[in-house]
Image: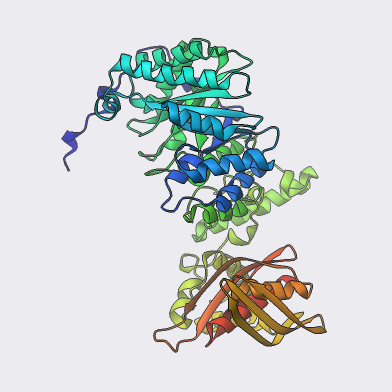
Amino acid sequence: MPFHRYRPAHERVAVPAFERAWPSRRIDRAPLWVPVDLRDGNQALAEPMDPGRKRRMFDLMVAMGFKEIEVGYPSASRTDFDFVRHLAESGAVPGDVTVVVFTAARRDLIDRTFDSVRGLPNAVVHLYTATAPVWRDRVLGHDRAALRALVEEAAAHMARLAEGTPVRFQFSPEVFNQTEPDYVLEVCDGLTALWDASPDRPVILNLPATVEIATPNVYADQIEYMHRHLARRDAVILSVHPHNDRGTGVACAELAVLAGAQRVEGCLFGNGERTGNVDLVTLALNLHTQGVDPQLDLSDIDEIRRTVEHCNRIPVHERHPYGGDLVYTAFSGTHQDAIGKGLRHHAARAAELGVPEREAPWEVPYLPIDPADVGRDYTAVIRVNSQSGKGGIAYLLRTGYGLDLPRRMRIEFAGAVQKATDGSGTEMTGKELWDLFRAEYLDRADDGPVTITEWRTGHTGPGRHDFTGVVSVAGAEGEHTGSGNGPLEALTSALASAGVRVEVLDYTEHATGPGGDAPAAAYAECRVNGVTRWGAGHDTSVLTASVRAVLSAVNRALS
């Protein structure tokens, strides 16, 4: 490989020598977290969010406790402008939340940006310009003096537009980490003077590692240099925006906080251009593991992940820190043994201290946090597979019966298999596994408090389906009809009219063999009157299999 074509980081940008203090510091409080999913993360999507998904993501961020949220680039698209206006006019922004909007250093774009935030009680207008030599020379065509003049002209225009308004200012010297420290300090100090930064009206200086080129300690040195040398330091909120090109975005952010950063911009689960922005979920939960309040509510990480996956249309990897499906799961027998013993010791210690297990100090091998802290239970922690001597559940069902269970359903079914194998003490065969699956899921469509007979569906118009059937709930029987944009939504509408509230959280289907006549399998994860369970259906008709899958989940949840 032609490694000789690349220059090391210290040859591309030099950090002046100084006595750094960050290596001996400890993080004892959370910085201000600022999610940029609705702007930076949205620009990185193959299919940018529509207004509905943008609002769902914004509402999630508010519910999680973010106090400053970057919501878009209103001069870049009509969708972003209209969304900022929607926030301003709908009352969706709580009084303690600040909206941030992004603009390049161009007068017409700045005007459009200020038009978008009109009426918001708390807003930050975020100005950016790339400052690194390669960008100055080859993209912008400006020398240092000309670029500084361009930035200051834009900043002065912002100051005029903001007179008499509650708007505050933010500046990002894009590609800060590849910019000469003396120059970026000159530009930033010029802006804090121009904007008359003061402790009661601070300016945010955001210093991005736009493209990672060095180890995290180099970024920390750059941040500490700015932290020590900025004019009006008490009137500046020092912010960082790490990317993940070298896979060290989290480390860069953590060391930057040690070096003096007070604010961190990133995305939920690390979405963003190229390899992504720094992951705020991982950063916050890393603090949680150190006994530091992350100042965010991550107690239902699966719901957070489902919302992010829906809005981004990008799945979160099953091994993603803290939020992936398998991160609290042990397949190895030695890991399972250590975790099992650790959990028993934890329960005994809680009893000894006279406190609930959720309040007892956590020290369980292989589990850095209690899965219950993020809304997980312990059924997925110890799993059965070939490594633990009890066979691969997914492999046997797929190869023997053509079933391909969704990941989260495998976790749920593993609990039933665990009970069966622990009870018998023997290996479970493929036939026994199928019998258990049929009894646990497939037969439940007909065995439970809710049944449906004589049902039919129809496509009654564009995006409209009807479902009609005789619904029996705990013996009370009657004909019910529902409508929706698909057969399953129409089915849940009919069930709702019968008094059973069902929300389909996840659904998948597939043929169980080659050829067009192979039976279909359908799987539905449903929340039924607040209880979440999986169901499964198996039939020659895909529609029938899907209806049976929902009924299976309903009866499992109500039993």
Please tell me which residue is depicted at 73% across the width and 50% down the height of the picture: 348
Query: Looking at the image, is 61 positioned above or below residue 523?
Result: above
Camera-side residue of 302 and 274? 274
| Residue 436 can be seen, yes or no | no
Please tell me which residue is depicted at 62% across the width and 22% down the height of the picture: 165
| Horizontal relation, residue 55 to residue 218: left or right | right
Q: How many marks?
A: 0
Q: Position of residue 356 (x, y in %)?
A: 77, 48
In the picture, the quarter occupied by the N terminus is: top left
Q: Position of residue 17 (x, y in %)?
A: 35, 12
Please tell me which residue is depicted at 47% across the width and 28% down the height of the picture: 110
Query: Looking at the image, is 541 positioned above or below residue 23?
Result: below
Camera-side residue of 44 and 418? 44
In the picture, the quarter occupied by the C terminus is: bottom right
Q: Residue furthest right?
A: 476
Scheme of colours in the image: rainbow
Camera-side residue of 232 and 433? 232
Query: Looking at the image, is 420 positioned above or below residue 503?
Result: below
Q: Position of residue 473 (x, y in %)?
A: 79, 79
The quadrant holding residue 550 is bottom right
| Residue 43 can be seen, yes or no | yes
